[in-house]
Amino acid sequence: MRVVVTGGAGFIGSHVVEALLARGDEVHVVDNLASGKRENVPSGATLHERDIREPLDDLFDELRPETVIHLAAQADVRVSVDRPDYDAGVNVLGTIRVLEAARPHDAQLVFSSTGGAIYGECSAPAREDQARVPLAPYGTSKLCGEEYLATYNRLHGTSHVALRFGNVYGPRQDPHGEAGVVAIFLGLIAEGGTPKVFGDGRQVRDYVYVGDVARATLAAIGAEAGVCNVGTGIATSVLDLLETCRIVTGRDVEAESAPARAGELQRSVLDPSLAGRRLGWRPQVALAEGLQRTWESIGAPL
């Protein structure tokens, strides 16, 4: 299969590209390297240095993709608050550019969306039909991308799929963005620094390993149109995450307390059962195992 992966030089994208290559697909990466890294692109994939905010029709006409995995995004909540126009330019206009470039080739899109930033506070693991109440422009722009996919499905009879990711972590993670706390904690521990815990540390998130996310993304290829959560359904507090990092690294680090951050979600957990039924996907990597793999990827320094 010929597959285009936008954002394939990034954290999640590079793992998806590896998984596609492992099953024998022809993979083309579209990335402007604003946050992605050339060295993240696995050998065997072809990198096309392009910006998704600009028309991509000429490139797609040349490549004629059968599937487009759209991971390129502005994923930093703080940036979306400070620069909502930039956030919308990448996440809304960029998604439209990709949809339009893919349309003449009848290529299915698999779109990376977000759970926590769309659902807001979750008293229980959020299902896909839960109220959508984004608290930052990032969540709004991702939700807008989902709605464009749904509109194209109705208008053009396509079968595009949106995946709402939990807090993705793993090797090559950027400490910036929605789920950077794992990269921050392990990076500081490796350097002998002091992790910082905001507020009481009881804020909970749904941490899902990047390898599981890559499997879910591939499972969505050829699936029926719609939206699925990609998470574990397990609530992990910041304090529990830090304790697991201590166990995995063997470092008895002390954390620094910091004031709570205004507007921070206290509880964000996803219900992944629909992905199990529709995609045949379930998370396989437990948090301790995923943190161990991530720690090893940064050299597991002594």
Image (tube, rainbow, N blue to C red):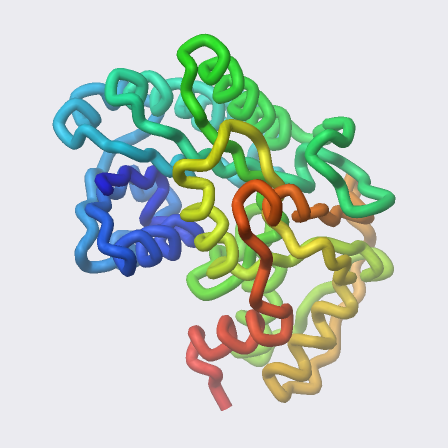
Q: Nearer the viewer, residue 179 or 109?
A: 109
The part of the image, by quadrant, that contains residue 197 is bottom right
Q: Nearer the viewer, residue 136 or 62?
A: 62
Residue at horizontal 47%, vertical 85%? 301
Which residue is painted at 73% across and 38% down in the image?
Answer: 127
Residue depicted at x 50% and y 71%: 294
Identity of the residue furthest to the top in this view: 155
**What residue is at 40 percent from the left and 35 percent from the top?**
70
> Is residue 123 at all visible to an observer of this figure?
yes
In x, y percent, where is residue 147? 56, 19
Q: How many marks?
A: 0
Q: Is residue 28 left or right of residue 258?
A: left
| Residue in front for this viewpoint, 80 or 61 | 61
Q: Tell me if residue 133 comes above or below residue 274 in the rendering.
A: above
Q: Position of residue 292 (x, y in %)?
A: 55, 77
Location of residue 79 (image quadrant): top right
| Along the line of sight, the residue nearer the viewer: 86 or 267 | 267
